[in-house]
Amino acid sequence: MARPIRVLIVDDSALVRQILSQGLSADPNIEVIGTAADPYLARDKIVQLKPDVLTLDVEMPRMDGVAFLRKLMPQFPIPIVMVSSLTQKGKQITLEALEAGAVDFVAKPTTNMAHGLNAMLGELRSKVRIAARANVSHWKNKRVTAPTATTSIANKALAESTDKVIAIGASTGGTEAIKKVITKFPVNTPGVVIVQHMPPGFTKMFSERLNQLCAMEVKEAENGDRIRQGRILVAPGALQLEVIRSGGIYQVRCHEGEKVSGHCPSVDVMMNSVAKNVGSNAVGAMLTGMGSDGANGMLAMKQAGAKNIAQDEASCVVFGMPKVAYEKGGAQQLVAIEDMASKIISLLTER
């Protein structure tokens, strides 16, 4: 039997530390090896205890979670799951934490504490197990540089591709991977639809942050939004997104629905609709993420004539969704995240 995942809990509340310790310890494959009330104590315990995974409160006195991450990750890259509040500030700090190296996050319950707490602890156990397999080694000695929103890749050729659609799916580690790809797209890139597994509220803020960095317009998708050149639409949390054709234009349909492949929004739902309604005019990209959501949809896209790629193992935080998409035959090639944007654009302009 493999040894349990060793977890260090960092939270300024003694009650929260106790709740998280009990919740995580309910999984026999997880061992809570210590707790810390603030990042300064946490740093010492990381050196001493060498945990496999850290859970980290977003908002703390003395030093918030993001500031701690920015100091920690270049020295001690370790998979971190943020424990986030659903306040506006909490959401903002959470997205900054994902940019600074956190693998994933769980949201603290705000209503129906008994049920909400059990659901949150179940989600935390699951994400700790995923985080334990995450590859964060690339953060070692890394200096964070601000992305630029300009690029000159194939601008002239892209102007001829207004009827194309780019479909991107991602999960764990995807917020940073998506940013690395779409900030390299020139302003005249064909319309993009994205499914990133993320709860309601966070997708809107995520879109707004990307909009500040990209040459293209980025927005959280609303039902009926047109997919057009120069625009990126991000599926809203807790709604399924489908691409439909209305006359000569493509639009999105956002609607409530059951989870598909374990998720809402689901990459499979989005990519199956792209296969049906866009066909050979589409290019698909599968980025880092746990599980297999999107593999069947990407295969359907390929069978409909689309060209698809997936992120390679070396640059993935979790090589799950891209691996399955490639093994099932939906993705024809594995590509490093740094080369993903230029490869997508070359596929768009291929005859």
Image (tube, rainbow, N blue to C red):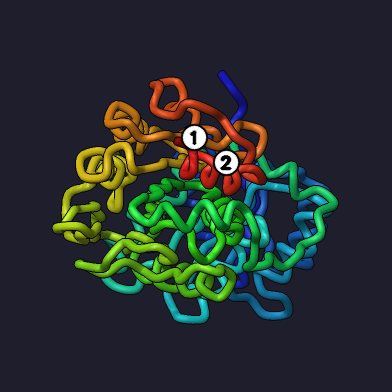
Residue appearing at x 68%, y 65% in the figure: 147
- Rendered view: 260 above or below 216: above
Helix, strand or loop for disc 2: helix
- Is tag 2's residue or tag 1's residue first in the polypeptide sequence? 1
Would residue 213 be seen by someone viewing this image from the given angle?
yes
Residue 114: x, y in percent?
A: 29, 63
Residue 231: x, y in percent?
A: 41, 66
Which of 76 and 152 lies nearest the eye of the viewer? Answer: 152
Number of callouts in the render? 2
Residue appearing at x 65%, y 61% in the figure: 151
**Image quadrant in which you'd find residue 68:** bottom right
- Rendered view: 230 above or below 47: below
**Cβ–Cβ under 8 Å for marks 2 and 1:** yes
The residue type indicated by label 2 comes to Lys
Residue 307: x, y in percent?
A: 42, 34
Badge 1 local density, few (<14 within 10 Å), some, or many (20+)? Answer: many
Residue, disc 1: 309
Where is the N terminus found, in terms of image quarters?
Answer: top right
Residue, disc 2: 343
- Rendered view: 46 above or below 260: below
Where is the C terminus found, in terms of image quarters?
Answer: top left
State the separation of the CA atoms marked 2 and 1.
8 Å
- Rendered view: 41 above or below 122: below
